[in-house]
Image (cartoon, helix red, strand yellow):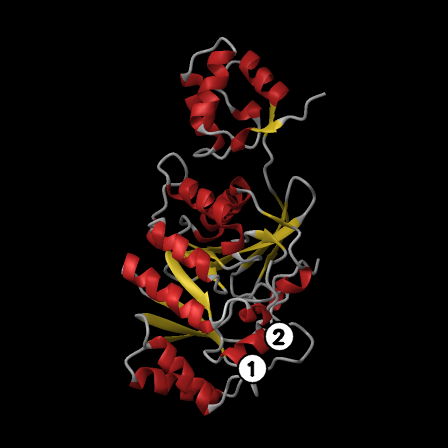
Amino acid sequence: MNKKKDIRALTKEALRDFFVENGDKAFRGNQVYEWLWSKASHTFEDMTNVSKATRAMLEENFVINHIKVDSMQRSKDGTIKNGIKLHDGFIVESVLIPTPKRTTACVSSQVGCSLDCKFCATSRLKRMRNLNPDEIYDQVVAIDNQSRLYHNHKLSNIVFMGMGEPLMNYNNVIKSIEKITSPEGLGMSPKRITVSTSGVPKIIKKMADDEVKFNLAVSLHSAIDEVRTSIMPFNTNFPLDDLRASLEYWYEKTERIITYEYIVWKGINDRKEDIQALVKFCGYVPCKVNLIEYNPIDDGEFQQASSSAINSYISNLEMHDITVNVRRSRGKDIDAACGQLANKS
């Protein structure tokens, strides 16, 4: 018996060809494609403008490997964390982050993570597999539905800051964004999408060459190689000089500023030289800095820096006309904040 093919792996053209080969009209492929993407249907039975015989034929040949929201936790601040069950039983997590003016979906791109950042709970899971484009897309659809249900408006922004390193699943992430931004998909503006990476220089350059339209954020956390390697060991393979060159290339090609995500920890990167190194690194490419509140992951190795250290970062960056925001974490009470996604359930 042949294993059924995931129908969402087919292009619209391939779907049209399938119907012609099976004695039907090509436009039937357009109808089914619309059900699969813009209507985000999870069953062939939903496709009411297609005959029962056609639905039976689809059922016989294909499967829709949709996600399922397996668990949902709501924080006292309105944040929602979802345990997303994939068709093969793996679970990833995604988060809805509400503010008075917008709602943001934080989506995952891998089961586990390809990298080894010591301060992040997800990295301890290691990478089990990449998510497919439709699995990423489904997370956005699910969070959009929650945004409409609980906050009375559609999803406004997407960040690839959930589980996984997006650039280590580049092709599938790009395909998912194409679907999310397509008029035949969710029709969202790429300007409302941010891909956050720990820094894979070769792929950052490829993104620039591919003329992507979304925003780029880099989890930096130190602008001193030795310090960065101590907390993000993969930095040995992707040192700051290489990262810097790729970011300069990105800006030269796209003319879009970069956001640096930066956590300050006690005794790790809270010294004067750490601040000076960041200020210098920010001088290479137009950028802004998000100073992120640290969210502990139980072992005590990393501790939030003092408010005086944070204030020193802020004053030094502002003195050099570098935009800096302090990002307070959301959903900490349900382990939904940055670095806490680890499928504890």
Q: Residue 145 at x, y = what percent?
A: 49, 45
Measured as percent of width and height from the top left, residue 344 is found at 69, 61
Q: Look at the picture and state if 141 lies above or below 193.
A: above
48 with respect to 210 (left or right) = right
Q: Secondary structure at mark 1?
A: loop
Badges 1 and 2: C-beta atoms under 8 Å apart? Answer: yes
Label 2 element class: loop
Number of numbered labels in the structure image: 2
Q: Within 10 angstroms of label 1, few (less than 14), some, or many (20 or more) residues?
A: some
Q: Which quarter of the figure has residue 215?
A: bottom left
Task: Give the amino acid type for the residue marked by disc 2 in the picture.
Answer: Pro
Evaluate whether residue 257 shows in this view. Answer: yes
Which image quadrant: the C terminus?
Answer: bottom right
| For marks 1 and 2 on the same chain, the one whose residue lies earlier in the sequence | 2
Which residue is labeled 1 in the image?
A: 304
Identify the residue under disc 2.
296
The residue that appears at 28% across and 61% down in the rendered structure is 252
Q: Quadrant of residue 244?
A: bottom left
